[in-house]
Image (spheres, rainbow, N blue to C red):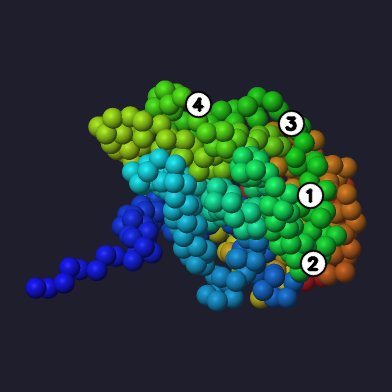
Amino acid sequence: HRPPPAAPAPRARALAPWLRLLPGLALVACATRLPSFRLPLWNPDEGFLAIQARLLADGGTLYLDVVDRKPPLLPWLYEGAFTLWGDTSLTPVRVAAVLAQLATALLIASLARRRWGSAAGRTAGLLHLLLSVGLNPEDTQAAAFAVFLLPATAAALWCADRHHWGTAGAALAAAFLVKQTGAVVLLPVLLLWWRAGGGARDLARLALGGALPVLATALATDPAGFLFWTVTGSGAYASFSGSVPHVLARALVNAALLAAASAALLLPLARAGRAPAELRLWLGGSALAVVTGLHFFGHYYLQLVPPLALLAARALHRRPPGARAGALRATAGLAALFVLWGLLAPRPDTDHAVRLAHAVRDRTAPGERVLVWTMHPETYWLAGRPPASRYLTAGLLTNHSGGRSGARTGEPYAVPGTWHVFRAETAADPPHLLVDDSRGGDWSPRHLPTLRALLAERYRPAGTVDGARLYVLRDR
């Protein structure tokens, strides 16, 4: 007689459900992010990150040679990808974005499985991926801050749920170091700590796990610059000014898009009863992150997706199997429409940036510095020319923002000290080509005495491209 087969080892039994779940979620992650590989760039954030990474790879220092109001983790990721695979394509970081969404889905699935069982876990992971495309494709398909923020926030909850306080702090730090609003996940983490007994030693582990990575990151850059550009220097951006109707319209449109993507889940959510407090707090904190600064860009809403997926999985878990399957099929169908939108929708801003980059490349030699007065810094990266200033967009020098209408703009509203630095940069090494891509906006050179004087004294017109005015140095 043959001996009975040995029982699977405990670790193998624990891994088996995930090995079955992983291929399906990976396939959905690839399918939902397929449009991201269609265009060279999806939005200005990708362009900003690409030119930042190129400058850093050439020996530049963040917050000194190039600045942004964001922490450095994602610029460093781009820099690493460029170092390994070259800096002419975003394909490697877009693959990383697929992996980030897959990792988030797995963490969400694990949180749901721990609470409500295996079926709820599968549902939560799937719902995260389906809902993550439920906005304008330029917000969901870009390999930018919002996408890479999600796995860190989900990891913070996952670790806190298992009382791994040091690693929960490290995940919190990672979320903050991708984007400042990632810090709101501290709220549900603290609630879980309090429910676990609220010991001082555990709180110290949480605080130390969060503080050490942030401190090390500050020391690896310019500490004063890190503090200014990530915290203290963002007051004007985070405070409200501008047209209330414009802001409300943007907020409502993006909320309506996410609600449409979640349409099959809204009724089950409404009937599900009182959800666990940490999940409601996570959703509320994420909503606070969306509201901060009252810009309401679509990608801000992505921070709502992981807690929303968890809450929806809980709601569907309480429904009959047929109703649950129907809601999942409807949500998948809606997600397919958003993916189709991403595959077919025209991108005039990208087309404009490509044409402008060709013009810049034709009028300059490699290595010659150019200044593109724009809110779309991707032109530098597409043209392969270094920027003449550490300020890659006009926003820091004028307080102009794509998310506002009627806000106060001009030199008096710039980030303090930026015009002094800008004058020194352009005087020491004037750009060979200056491109005014403001196209008559309230942040155009005619409203800015310093830029207007620079053009009058040093430059002559050299034609237009798609409404952008080109100027070359007079002595060329």
Helix, strand or loop at label 1? It is: loop
Identified by mark 3, the residue type is Gly
Mark 1 to mark 2: distance in Å?
Answer: 15 Å
Find residue 472 and report its horizontal and vertical position in percent: 75, 64
- What secondary structure is marked by label 4? loop
Which one is earlier in the sequence, the residue at label 3 or at label 1?
Answer: 1
Q: Nearer the viewer, residue 209 or 147?
A: 209
- Pair 1/2: label in front: 2
Q: Is residue 238 left or right of residue 261?
A: right
* Mark number, residue 231: 1
The quarter of the rendered structure image containing the C terminus is bottom right
Quarter of the N terminus within the rendering: bottom left
Amino acid type indicated by mark 2: Leu
Disc 2 to disc 3, how far (Cα)? 36 Å
Near-viewer residue (307 or 75): 307
Residue type for callout 1? Val
Tag shown at residue 219? 2
Q: CA distance from mark 4 to mark 3?
A: 38 Å
| Cα–Cα span, label 4 and label 1 | 36 Å
The mark lying in front, picked from 3 and 1, is: 1
Q: Which residue is mark 4?
A: 274
Quick one: label 2 or label 4, which is nearer the N terminus? 2
Image x and y of residue 438, in percent: 70, 47
Q: Residue at x 57, y 33 (%)?
A: 277
Q: Report the residue at 29% width, 65% height from top.
A: 8
Instruction: Name the residue carrying label 3.
Output: 242
Q: Secondary structure at mark 2?
A: helix
Assess disc 2: are there few (<14), some (14-19) or many (≥20) residues with their C-alpha within 10 Å of its C-alpha. Answer: few
Residue found 60% across the figure and 71% down from its top: 80
Between marks 4 and 1 in the image, the one whose residue lies nearer the viewer? 4
